[in-house]
Amino acid sequence: MGNYQICDFCGNLYAKTVGKMCGDCERNYHRLRDIIVAHPGMTVLELSNHTGITVRKILTFVERGFFIMREGTIEERQ
């Protein structure tokens, strides 16, 4: 694949970088993080409705250890 790699989150092909996610997934991560910090205690569904990011993608970030889910709410991993 040379100068390209597959995003660990969405499966899209993108130009190789240091990270393991494409630019779209990286932007989604930062949007989620900013909202979680500003509004702790939001549920996954509320986050999805607020950001337009699918529940599935949010849960992928949780599964990969970027966020922690407790009792239905999402927290920033510290």
Image (tube, grey):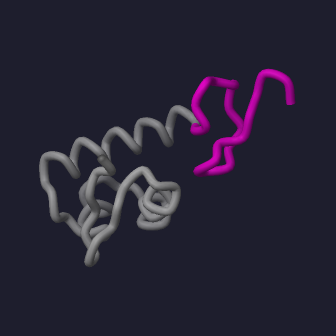
Looking at the image, the residue that sits furthest to the left is 39
Is residue 9 shown left or right of residue 65? right
Q: Quadrant of residue 20?
A: top right
Q: Based on the picture, tell me whether residue 26 belongs to the magenta stretch.
A: no
The residues colored magenta run 1-21
Is residue 39 shown left or right of residue 25? left
Q: Quadrant of residue 68?
A: bottom left
Q: Residue shown at 35%/38% (left/top)?
A: 30
- Residue closer to the observer: 8 or 47: 8
Query: Is most of the magenta stretch helix, strand or loop?
Result: loop
Looking at the image, the residue that sits furthest to the bottom is 71
Q: Residue shown at 63%/24% (left/top)?
A: 17
Q: Position of residue 8 (x, y in %)?
A: 64, 47
Looking at the image, the residue that sits furthest to the right is 1
Quarter of the image that includes the N terminus: top right
Is residue 34 shown left or right of residue 22? left
Q: Residue shown at 24%/42% (left/top)?
A: 34
Q: Position of residue 23 (x, y in %)?
A: 52, 32
Q: Position of residue 33 (x, y in %)?
A: 29, 45
Q: Quadrant of residue 21?
A: top right
Q: Is residue 41 above or below residue 29?
A: below
Is residue 46 shown left or right of residue 64? left
Q: Residue shown at 39%/55% (left/top)?
A: 53
Q: Is residue 63 above or below residue 39?
A: below
